Amino acid sequence: MTSSAGRADSEAGGPAGERVELTVPVEVAVPADVLWRGVTDWEGQSEWMLGTQVQVTGGDGRSVGTELRAVTGIGPLGVADTMRITGWTEPPSGAGGERRVVVVHTGRVIRGEGVFAVEELGPRRSRFLWSELLDLPFGTLGRLGWPLVRPAFAAGVTWSLRRMATRTEDRWRAGR
């Protein structure tokens, strides 16, 4: 079965209208635990996230307090996104239940919160939700620029999630 990605997103203004929200879902034809392992393989995100290299810089990568660094860009031009995991919810192996990780973006440019959540839709079907609540950088310039940047940002995340879904399904069918 092919993956399908939809998009549900909105903008949420903070006190000065400087905070925006973006949520991108994708359905994946694999069990929830398989999808969870794939999306929380932080360094593995480098294989499917458009123009991004991710590394665990502190902690075990699977618990609160873990620190991550993602650099998105081309060649020497890139933006670093440092994060700290502030919430980790995972059921025991083989059990159903909520799977969710919350990060706080701690960088100079990218700040705010992010959530990865996996919902079980059936024994062999899941939904992944990527949500970001970001503080726009650069003051007025950021506020004015967001309507121009947002479509490209959303398209890049959507493309990346479709790529992740296809790779995860292919690997699961191949027994990897």
Image (spheres, grey):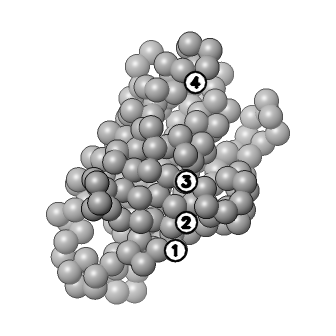
Residue at 44% in and 50% down:
53
Residue at 69% in and 45% down:
98
Dot 2 falls on a residue whose secondary structure is strand
Real-space CA distance between mark 3 and mark 1, rounded to the nearest whole angstrom: 15 Å
Q: Is residue 37 depicted above or below 15 in this figure?
A: above
Q: Is residue 125 depicted above or below 47 in this figure?
A: above
Real-space CA distance between mark 4 and mark 2, rounded to the nearest whole angstrom: 28 Å
Residue 42 seen from this side: yes
Pointers 3 and 4 in contact (C-beta within 8 Å)? no
Percent of width and height locating residue 27: 47, 32
In this picture, residue 38 sits left or right of residue 54: right
Q: Which mark is residue 106?
A: 1
Quadrant into which the C terminus falls: top right
Quadrant into which the N terminus falls: top left
Where is mark 3, residue-wise? 55
In this picture, residue 5 sits left or right of residue 87: left
Real-space CA distance between mark 1 and mark 2, rounded to the nearest whole angstrom: 5 Å
Q: Is residue 128 depicted above or below 10 in this figure?
A: above
Percent of width and height locating residue 54: 50, 52
Real-space CA distance between mark 2 and mark 3, rounded to the nearest whole angstrom: 10 Å
Q: Amino acid at mark 3?
A: Gln
Where is mark 2, residue-wise? 83
* Sequence-first tag of 3 and 1: 3
